[in-house]
Image (cartoon, rainbow, N blue to C red):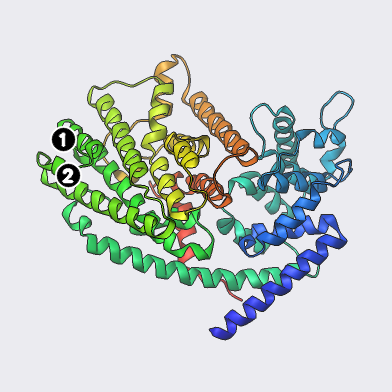
Amino acid sequence: MDDIFVQHSQKLELLRNVLRNVAEVDALEGLNMIDAVQRLGIDYHFQREIDEILYKQMSIVSACDDLHEVALRFRLLRQHGYSVPEDMFNNFKDSKGTFKQALGEDIKGLMSLYEASQLGTEGEDTLVEAEKFSGHLLKTSLSHIDHRRARTVGNTLRNPHHRSLASFMARNFFVTSQATNSWLNLLKEVAKTDFNMVRSLHQNEIVQISKWWKELGLAKELKFARDQPLKWYTWSMAGLTDPKLSEERVELTKPISFVYLIDDIFDVYGTLDDLILFTEAVNRWEITAIDHLPDYMKICFKALYDMTNEFSCKVYQKHGWNPLQSLKISWASLCNAFLVEAKWFAAGQLPKSEEYLKNGIVSSGVNVVLVHMFFLLGQNITRKSVELLNETPAIISSSAAILRLWDDLGSAKDENQDGNDGSYVRCYLEEHEGCSIEEAREKTINMISDEWKKLNRELISPNPFSATFTLASLNLARMIPLMYSYDGNQCLPSLKEYMKLMVYETVSM
């Protein structure tokens, strides 16, 4: 095993030099190599080289007639926080201001344009047009291009890189990418070794989580609640991809498990009177506040209270900041939002869709998870950043809205549960008489797209959060379709495939 580590480190160093040299000689080839590194999910090994190359790319004049090069440069720069303008694509428009039809022959360029359009922000009409234009021509091309290329085009349309988990899509890249240069095969070889090393790390983390959950004993005490530590860990694994963040992944899974647990209490088991008492106890955050609670709620609150205090101590010891106040606020907000929903459904009333979504952003649990993640990472913790965090900034609220809307698009009941559950689609249909379910679903899909535009704005706007935190927020948004795409059997095939890939399967060398 030590020999494998040594060889892997040597190959990584070789590839770092190759990347620097390639980018120095040929700007486009440097961009292609960065793209490949990202699609293979191993870019965390090359951050310094990537940052240096993209900084130089900013100075390259955009008056280039290669659509692939311009679109790829635009996407990579935006992904890394550079506010490059959408008018980089004006060179590909005709005198009427629309994209030239002649571009229809350039499949590679159209795929890159479609990928670039996913980085659009609110009000960027050129990128909206770019998505429609490239998407239409790519769909049309599927009927007359060869099978291998059609597979690549289809995958681009279904899973554009910016909205997908690189770790999940890497397998497709292994299959569809062809080595037209000297470095791609070496990259693939390194990626396979890396993948297997990380898989072993994930297995070890799952053992730690399972041990913690078993010793906590809540699965025995609260029979009604979900008992899914592997699923909960999957959120942490998707959000925090750097292998060095092993301890953080394990610790983050703990509050995630309580989000699911408390959700089950509100959605499946608790009476309204008991839920009011539980919410009051969480808001007061005093262990003496649980005397009047039913036994199962006492057990849950005590476990939440202890876990949160222990979590706060660890953060303080490691980063010198006590996050307890912010964590208490996040748990109180979550329970308050759960209670609002419980009261709606107990009264048999549907709120306005806007009111439902505003509350649903909080009840999604995303805020709780990202607040805990922020303190775990320990980067850029200042009074200003904590104040902003407590106000639920767009980097959190947009990810939360995406989760709530995606969840509500699902036609199947969540894991056969019999509890009350709302839906933005239902609220919208009730509010708009004569609207069809197809129209309501289309409205929801468009809103998800709008929230992605807000996330994209956060990428290129100054904010006090670290790049690691921003990436993790995006990764949670990318994870959501896997977590909420139910099939006709009320199962999650994409999620099962992701777990199998990341935890159980060895990538053959």
The residue at which mark 2 appears reads as: 297
Callout 1, which amino acid? Asp
Q: Are marks 2 and 1 in contact (CB under 8 Å)?
A: yes
Image quarter of residue 141: top right
**Image spot of residue 104 (x, y percent):** 82, 39
Residue extending farthest bottom: 3
**Image spot of residue 340 (x, y percent):** 29, 28
SS at mark 1? Answer: helix
Q: Nearer the viewer, residue 381 or 76?
A: 381
Callout 2, which amino acid? Met
Q: Quadrant of the C terminus?
A: bottom right
- Alpha carbon of mark 2 to alpha carbon of mark 1: how far? 8 Å
**Image spot of residue 361 (x, y percent):** 42, 33
Q: Nearer the viewer, residue 492 or 314?
A: 314
Image quarter of residue 83: top right
The total of numbered circles placed on residues is 2
Relative side of 482 to 41, left or right = left
Task: Identify the residue at horizontal 86%, vertical 23% (top origin).
Answer: 96
Q: Earlier in the sequence, mark 2 or mark 1?
A: 1
Task: Identify the residue at horizontal 83%, vertical 44% (top origin).
Answer: 67
The residue at which mark 1 appears reads as: 274
Task: Identify the residue at horizontal 25%, vertical 63% (top origin).
Answer: 214
Q: Does residue 144 appear in this view?
A: no
**Image spot of residue 427 (x, y percent):** 39, 23
